[in-house]
Image: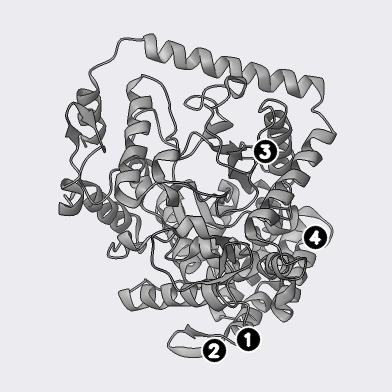
Amino acid sequence: MSDLLTRRLDALTRHNAAPTLAGMRRGIEKESLRITPQGALAQTPHPAALGSALTHPYLTTDYSEALLEFITPASDQLDAPLRFLEDLHRYVYQHIGDERLWVNSMPCVMGPDEDIPLARYGSSNVGQMKYIYRKGLGYRYGRRMQTIAGIHYNLSFPENFWQLHQQLEGDTRPLQDFISARYFDLTRNFQRYSWLLIYLFGASPALCKSFLAGRPHTLSEIAGHTLTYPGATSLRMSDLGYQNNAQSSLHISYNTLDDYVRTLTHAIKTNAPEYARIGVLVDGEYRQLNSNILQIENEYYSSIRPKRTTASGERPTLALSRRGVEYVEIRALDLNPFEPLGINQMQIRFLDLFATYCLLRESPLLENCDLNASKENIRKVVYQGRDTGTLLCNWGKQVSLHDWGGQILERMAPIAALLDTTHGGSHYAEALAGQQEKLDNPDATPSAQVMAALTTQGPCSFFHFAQAQAEAHRAHFLAQPLAAEREDALAAEARDSLAAQTALEAAPHPSFAEYLAAYFRD
């Protein structure tokens, strides 16, 4: 174990830090495409019974009108996010007719880009901005990439933990400055070690051939128009999917809060000639918000984001500058097609362990060579991770995925003990043991289980496998309708959100051009 990690864990244990960790807060954002019974992308509008995608706090859309996003409130109760997510799914299934939810990260059969409907948010300035931003993404990257779904895990440590941790570190800065700096330590280590999450939880080793129609690739075709790569774990996280090559030249710094805000702001304010050629306002219609490297902060496809809750109309970078980091958003997670919710409680516990490990171990500043090594490690795990003899770069030394992963998991054991003291029982230790089993036996990983379903049962195409899983999950959610009081509460939430959107659109407002100029003004 690293000396610093050992010292920090010993100090936290001696000073009874376990009760302070009970206040860790967790939230989940989960995306799923709506599809027809035949498995095609739904062309229907966002259902009115689900409320306003603009103002509903828990049910919205991501890129496409068909890409639902389920959002749970943050909670310090371990099982609360999954219970809330379960309720949302049951409610949705009661109000989408015969449509289904696609259960894989990689999308269903794709037609041409113009068949992918952009999400609509109404006529208010903020609604127009969200829609035009999505138009810009389509022009820049194509619409297919934006139909990829994932799970985002939001995590924060409580203030009393930070107070104790700062005292034990002998740090005398204002508390929020300390908190922000430590969250950036976490994010840097996350980038160094997130290859392990991709191995353990990657569940997109194959995709439908239609997704890459017209694009060059090195994947192999197997049964039923299915593309894969030997040993693949998460093609969502490859250069074919989530990690888009168009942003490969961006150098966003995670070394300090100031560096992060400075480099991200530079990308938002710097013109990109290739995007200028698209045009911004063409024949009276907006094609994109601007022609800069990034239209807004969210366009940067990072696997983890330091976050601060924003006020209405406030840019994320300004919120961070003004009030510091509040929580982190982990974005490297595929939907698990074998889980009705795409994620389970054991995975949540391991994410707690992983984030705490990234926080407590040493975290040197990231140089370009470190970033390049991390990206190469991820690339190798994405394409050949189920070969656990694959060699990765650990501070300039070549080490097998299996050996390095085992070292990391071993170092998490005292963290599991600390969190089990916090919550009682041995669930964190069991979650850790479950990941060691997957490291020792690659066939136990979700990606291997997907490939087994595709190759040993027929064989079966990716499309038919995913469609069968969608049917099974639909049956699961419809088998037990929501309790009447939960149905009524979510129905009221939907009505309130529609009323809020109507009021927003009726209120006096500046022109869209004035609104946009004000939004980007410092």
State the image coordinates of residue 228 (x, y, percent, origin top left).
56, 69
Q: CA distance from mark 3 to mark 4?
A: 38 Å
Kind of residue indicated by mark 4:
His
Q: Earlier in the sequence, mark 3 or mark 4?
A: 3
Res. 195 in view: yes
> Which quadrant of the rendered structure holds the N terminus?
bottom right
Kind of residue indicated by mark 3:
Pro
Q: CA distance from mark 1 to mark 4?
A: 24 Å
> Which quadrant of the rendered structure holds the C terminus?
top left
Q: Nearer the viewer, mark 2 or mark 3?
A: 3
State the image coordinates of residue 213 (x, y, percent, origin top left).
44, 58
Q: Is disc 3 placed on a helix, strand or loop?
A: loop
Q: Earlier in the sequence, mark 1 or mark 3?
A: 3
Label drawn at residue 399: 2
Binning the other alpha carbons within 10 Å of mark 2 as few (below 14), some (14 to 19) or many (20 upward) gives some
Kind of residue indicated by mark 1:
Asp
Q: Earlier in the sequence, mark 2 or mark 4?
A: 2
Judge left or right: residue 275 versus residue 20.
Answer: left
Kindly check if marks 1 and 4 are in contact, taking CB atoms under 8 A apart as contact. no
Q: Which residue in the structure is indicated by mark 4? A: 427
Q: CA distance from mark 2 to mark 3?
A: 47 Å
Front-most of 503 and 213? 213
Q: Which residue in the structure is indicated by mark 3? A: 37
Front-most of 404 and 413? 404
Binning the other alpha carbons within 10 Å of mark 3 as few (below 14), some (14 to 19) or many (20 upward) gives some
Q: Is disc 4 placed on a helix, strand or loop?
A: helix
Q: Is disc 2 placed on a helix, strand or loop?
A: strand
- For the point 25% across and 36% down, which residue is it? 287
Q: CA distance from mark 1 to mark 3?
A: 45 Å
- For the point 67% across and 23% down, which residue is it? 490
Q: Nearer the viewer, mark 3 or mark 4?
A: 3
